[in-house]
Image (cartoon, grey):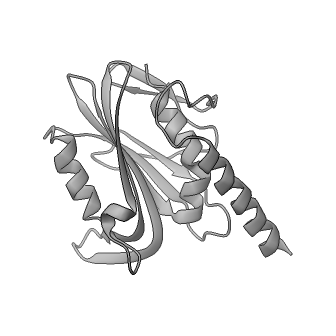
Amino acid sequence: MKRILTRVSFFCLSLALFASGETVDAQSTKKALTGPEMNLGGMKSKTSGKWKADKPEKPELYRYIMPKSFGDKVDAILTVVEDPSKKSADALISEWKAMFKPPKGKTIDSVASVQKVKIGNADIAYFEVHGTYLKKNADGETQELPNYRMYVARLDTGKNVYIVKAVGPYNTMTFHKIDFKSFLASFK
């Protein structure tokens, strides 16, 4: 019974996300966030009250746990780093695509999307992808994590470039998608 309720809940959430417009802009994203405020080079946004602050690991500025949902076994992780290389959005998008292997019969471009917007003083390149996450371990080996999803944004404030990345199991990431997009759209 619990499994059926979980699947029905996930289906309803998927329909709500589909109907929500899938954009990262202040006009279409109206969800109020209740978590702590994050400051990136003078631009501020509240975080989701569902996310749990965690101790950042170098070079991270911020780290949050996005609690597991819909039967997933692990939490998703959101990290924020400053990018001293200030790579272009297109160069980073190429790197982000290489972090995933698409599902069988698909191409990476068919399971990824890119959106470029201006919010406040920042130019934001937003990238989303799903498939098998090719996670690099500390020893340099690659661990394949199937059925994962990643949301990542490059925020260029004119002075600094920040990378906001959330990655985790597909269902959990879907659950946190509206909060992630609201968080990005709320930067001022």
Q: Measured from the top left, where is residue 166 in percent x and y?
A: 44, 51
Q: Nearer the viewer, residue 103 or 80?
A: 103
**Residue drawn at point x = 56 percent, y = 52 percent:** 66
Q: Nearer the viewer, residue 113 or 66?
A: 113
Q: Is residue 46 above or below residue 108?
A: above
Q: Residue furthest bottom?
A: 104
Residue 62 occupies quadrant: top left
Q: Measured from the top left, where is residue 26 in percent x and y?
A: 50, 25
* Numbered marks: total: 0
Q: Measured from the top left, where is residue 101 in percent x and y?
A: 33, 73
**Residue drawn at point x = 73 percent, y = 68 percent:** 7
Does 33 sit left or right of 136 as displayed? right
**Residue drawn at point x = 63 percent, y = 38 percent:** 49
Specify the quadrant that holds the N terminus: bottom right
Does 7 sit left or right of 39 as displayed? right
Does 188 sit left or right of 21 as displayed? left
Q: Nearer the viewer, residue 182 or 114?
A: 114
**Residue drawn at point x = 61 percent, y = 48 percent:** 17
Residue 107 occupies quadrant: bottom left
Specify the quadrant that holds the C terminus: top left
Residue 51 occupies quadrant: top right
Q: Measured from the top left, where is residue 88 in percent x and y?
A: 16, 40
Q: Residue furthest right?
A: 1
